[in-house]
């Protein structure tokens, strides 16, 4: 797991090498899925759940499963929407698997929620906004590389992916990231 962690750090620092590696490494899709699931678990732990509580109580286990499934569905849907916007609306290129990898490697930026919550003085909406902006920045950098489009269009695709997720989750009656 050393190489994926190295690439994760490169991705959150917006380094191009991470996205080139994702493009040529088909195993990175599995790594991205693991990052999404582990990030969701860490967010639950940061919200006050314990591993013991999540594993032993029925309600805790249900929350763990539902939360992880929500994160994985977000990962799939967001990636698909951002890919479709990039390819079909903005005239970009790329393939869906790489968009999955980009989104999965961007997802751990949401852990900023835990760290800002520890500061205590920041409102929760500011913590969420910080995580969202960092997530969008990483995805934008990846879309610029993979979609071969200018940064302005990549920002539209990254934000459009989230808007599409909000619309779909509202229709289906589920919210969240």
Image (tube, rainbow, N blue to C red):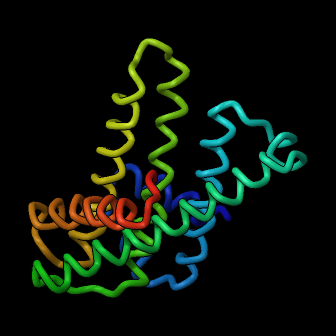
Residue 119's spot in the image, x, y percent? 50, 17
The answer to whether one can see residue 106 in this image is: yes
**Residue positioned 36% across, 51% down in the render:** 135
The reply to whether residue 18 is visible in this rendering is no
Q: Nearer the viewer, residue 9 or 60?
A: 60
The quadrant the N terminus occupies is bottom right
Provide residue 165's location: percent of width, then percent of height.
34, 64
**Place of residue 94 in the rendered image (x, y in percent of width and height, measured from the top left):** 28, 85
Q: Quadrant of residue 95?
A: bottom left
Please say if 88 is above or below 176.
below
What residue is at 63 percent from the left and 59 percent from the top?
Answer: 68
Residue toward you, 39 or 8: 39
Nearer to the camera, 127 or 29:
127
| Image coords of residue 8 (percent x, y) | 50, 58
Q: Is residue 136 left or right of residue 58?
A: left
- Point 15% across, 62% down: residue: 156
At 48% from the left edge and 35% from the top edge, which residue is drawn?
113
């Amino acid at each position: 797991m050393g190489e994926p962690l190295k690439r994760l750090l490169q991705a959150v620092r917006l380094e191009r090498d991470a996205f080139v590696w994702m493009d040529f490494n088909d195993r990175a899709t599995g790594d991205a899925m693991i990052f999404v699931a582990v990030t969701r678990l860490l967010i639950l732990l940061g919200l006050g759940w314990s591993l013991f509580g999540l594993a032993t109580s029925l309600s805790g286990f249900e929350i763990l499963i539902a939360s992880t499934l929500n994160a994985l569905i977000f990962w799939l849907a967001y990636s698909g929407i951002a890919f479709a916007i990039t390819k079909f609306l903005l005239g970009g290129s790329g393939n869906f698997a790489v968009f999955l990898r980009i989104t999965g490697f961007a997802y751990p930026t949401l852990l900023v929620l835990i760290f800002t919550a520890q500061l205590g003085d920041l409102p929760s909406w500011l913590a969420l906004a910080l995580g969202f902006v960092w997530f969008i920045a990483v995805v934008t950098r990846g879309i610029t590389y993979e979609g071969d489009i200018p940064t302005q269009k990549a920002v539209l695709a990254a934000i459009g992916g989230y808007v599409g997720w909000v619309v779909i989750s509202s229709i289906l009656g589920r919210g969240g990231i």
